[in-house]
Image (cartoon, grey):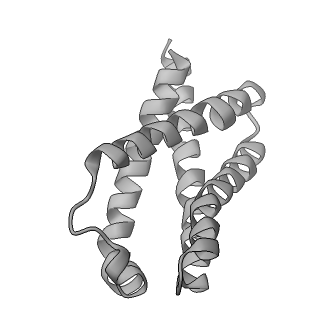
Amino acid sequence: MKLFIAFAASLLTLLACDALWLGTAYKPLYLPAMGSLLSPQVNFGAAAAFYGLYALGLSWLIVLPAIKTDRIADLSVRAGFFGVVAYGTYDLTALSVLRDWPLGLSLIDMAWGGVITLAAANVARIALKMIRTTR
């Protein structure tokens, strides 16, 4: 049950934050940098697989172990680092194999990965605490 709560809370947070981020950063940041690489349509199946896998990994590997100790700083550092590493996997791979991939975009996207993952982990922690205190 804890895994499901952490998963749902982190998934909803990731979706909401990325919707806001992409809604504001897509045209000024991603479109000029990635122009011809972008698909005209979003592959929603691939997006669902990413968000589901990411929320599950975050919940299982970061949130659940951290709530046992209830150390917010530990959770925050681990979640932020997890986000930078995960987003960095994509961004640094793109930087290494795609011609004209902008370093600046990779750095911004990796920072965003840290921020969004930190937020999602803390929302999941709060959701778990709320459930625990109501039982």
Q: Nearer the viewer, residue 109 or 72?
A: 109
Q: Residue at x 55, y 85 (%)?
A: 102
Residue 94: give x, y in percent of width and height: 56, 70
Query: Going by the image, does 62 lie left or right of 31?
Result: right
Compared to residue 110, the image places residue 15 above or below, namely above
Q: In the image as oriented, which residue stretches furthest toward the left?
A: 41
Q: Could you say which is closer to the camera, residue 21 or residue 94? A: 94
Residue, x 60% and y 53% (percent of image)? 118
Name the residue rendered at 74%, 24% in the picture: 68
111 above or below 13? Answer: below
Query: What is the quadrant of residue 66 in the picture?
Result: top right
Q: For the point 49% across and 37% down, which residue is it? A: 53
Q: For this view, does 91 lie left or right of residue 28?
A: right
Place residue 62 in its image quadrant.
top right
Depicted 75 relative to depicted 67: above or below? below
Residue 83 at x, y = what percent? 62, 55
Q: Nearer the viewer, residue 103 or 76?
A: 103
Residue 125 in view of the camera: no
Task: Return the x and y of residue 33 as percentages of the image width and height.
Answer: 43, 85
Rendering quarter of residue 38: bottom left
